[in-house]
Structures are given as C-alpha cells and as structure tokens.
Amino acid sequence: MIDLTSTDVQQRPRWNEIYRKKGVEVGVDKGDFIVAADEEKAYALAPAVYYIWNMCNGETTVGRIVESLAENIEEEIDMDTLYNAVTDIIDKLLEVNLLEKA
C-alpha cells in the first residue's frame, strides 16, 4: 500500500494537470491494446499504459490517476516511483500524439 496522506503528495508539479486521450482503440493483440493515432500509425499499449491512457478523459488529474493506480496495486511501491512512472508514460503518449493537454 502507498501512503496517500503524505503532505508532499500534492506538491508534485504535475499533480493537478489534466490530459485528454487522442486516437482510437482498434483491438487487442497478445494482451496489448492497439490504439491508432491516425490512419498511418498505431501503437500497442501494455495494459498499465492503456489504463493511464484511458483515464485521460479531459477531467481526471494526474494525481487522481496516481491515486487510482495506488489503490489497485497490491505490492508495496514508493509514491515518488509511481508518480514518476505515470508522468513518464504520459510524456511518451504525448510524444506519439495519443494525448493532448486539456
């Protein structure tokens, strides 16, 4: 479990940022979710990456995504590690045009 009551949790610079997913889900292949950015480019998203992409609905904050993952992860993980992983994934999704800042 992760301690979400830490005073520094909401001090993270991107905690309140909001993103909107782009692209279209076109199927599943070998456990990965296939999402097309456009007619020429499609990406295979691992389940955790797909979960983050899908939560980017234009209303959910980065902090809420981190909290949601923390609630569903059974193993012990450091909050900074989880936050950094989520923001790294968001950056990659932005880079390949599967997200935009809301």
Image (cartoon, rainbow, N blue to C red):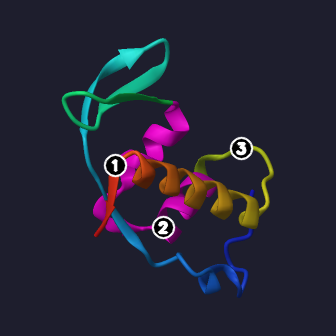
Q: Earlier in the sequence, mark 3 or mark 2?
A: 2
Disc 2 element: helix
Q: Which quadrant would the N terminus be assigned to in this image?
A: bottom right
Q: Position of residue 47 (x, y in %)?
A: 51, 32
Whether 56 is among the magenta residues is: yes
**Magenta part of the chain:** 46-70
Type of the residue with mark 2: Val
Type of the residue with mark 1: Asn
Q: Which residue is mark 1?
A: 97
Q: Position of residue 100 (x, y in %)?
A: 31, 60
Q: CA distance from mark 3 to mark 1?
A: 31 Å
Dot 3 alpha-carbon crowd within 10 angstroms: few under 14, some 14 to 19, many 20 or more: few
Q: Is residue 31 above or below residue 74?
A: above
Say left or right for 60 vs 38: right
Dot 2 alpha-carbon crowd within 10 angstroms: few under 14, some 14 to 19, many 20 or more: many
Q: Earlier in the sequence, mark 3 or mark 1?
A: 3
Look at discs 3 and 2 and give the one toward the viewer. 2
Q: Which residue is mark 3?
A: 74
Residue 8 figure quarter: bottom right
Question: Which residue is painted at 79% across and 61% down in the image?
Answer: 78
The outermost residue toward the top is: 30
Type of the residue with mark 3: Glu
Q: Which residue is mark 2?
A: 62
Look at discs 3 and 1 and give the one toward the viewer. 1
Question: Which residue is painted at 63% across and 56% down in the image?
Answer: 70
Question: Which residue is painted at 66% across and 79% down in the image?
Answer: 9
Disc 1 element: loop
